[in-house]
Amino acid sequence: MKKIEHIGIAVSNLENASIIYEKLFGAPAYKEEEVASEGVKTAFFMSGPNKIELLEASNPESPIAKFIAKKGEGIHHIAFEVEDIVAEIERLKNEGFIVLNEIPKKGADNKLVAFLHPKSTNGVLIELCQEIR
């Protein structure tokens, strides 16, 4: 893994949360997009070299809606940048991690993504990210 790519924060209202993070970072989101396949609307902010992704459920059955219903707003996942997501998925499976997506899928911000189950990572949802080339 190369670096922390971003930290994902689940929010109930993307517009209201974006106002807070605009004030916090002194700049607006650099990107907003909807990932319909995941039932989520996102906004990305930069803080120095670090990215924060705000995630709002776009439907009541989405993983973010279920997360907020169970745990409330807050840190949802930590994403790590990888060079070769397919090789990294295989390596982590061989290390005993529970991989939720054995085949990477298209995520936000021009990335291929896959997730590791929190049961195998001390309660933290881990996202693997590879830039789509």
Image (cartoon, helix red, strand yellow):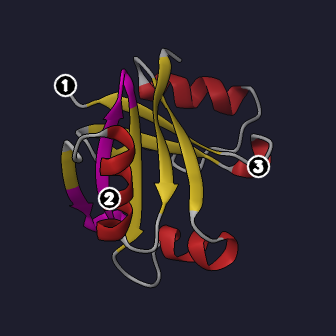
Query: Alpha-carbon distance for marks 2 and 1?
Result: 29 Å
Which residue is disc 1 drawn over?
133
Badge 1: residue crowd in 10 Å (few <14, some 14–19, many ≥20): few
Above or below, 85 against 122 in this view is above
Query: Alpha-carbon distance for marks 1 and 3?
Result: 31 Å
Among the two numbered marks 2 and 3 on one chain, the one whose residue lies closer to the N terminus: 2
- Magenta span includes 62: no
> Where is residue 88 shown, x and y percent of the image?
53, 24
Magenta range is: 33-50
Q: Nearer the viewer's eye, disc 2 or disc 3?
A: 2
Among the two numbered marks 1 and 3 on one chain, the one whose residue lies closer to the N terminus: 3
Q: Decide if residue 55 is on the left or right side of residue 33.
A: right
> Residue flagged by tag 3: what amino acid is it?
Gly
Mark number displayed over residue 18: 2
Mark number displayed over residue 123: 3
Work out which residue is located at the far bottom of the displayed protein and give it: 60
Asked which secondary structure carries label 3, the reply is: loop
> Residue flagged by tag 2: what amino acid is it?
Ser
- The one of 29 and 55 positioned closer to us in this rendering: 29
For the residues labelled 2 and 1, say whether their Cβ atoms are less than 8 Å apart: no
> Where is residue 70 shown, x and y percent of the image?
68, 76
Asked which secondary structure carries label 2, the reply is: helix
Q: Residue at x 22, y 47 (%)?
A: 28
Badge 3: residue crowd in 10 Å (few <14, some 14–19, many ≥20): few
> Where is residue 65 shown, x and y percent of the image?
50, 76
> Where is residue 104 shown, x and y percent of the image?
40, 42
- The one of 20 and 118 positioned closer to us in this rendering: 20
Asked which secondary structure carries label 1, the reply is: loop
Q: Residue at x 28, y 40 (%)?
A: 26
For the residues labelled 1 and 3, say whether their Cβ atoms are less than 8 Å apart: no
> Residue flagged by tag 1: what amino acid is it?
Arg
Query: Alpha-carbon distance for marks 2 and 3?
Result: 26 Å
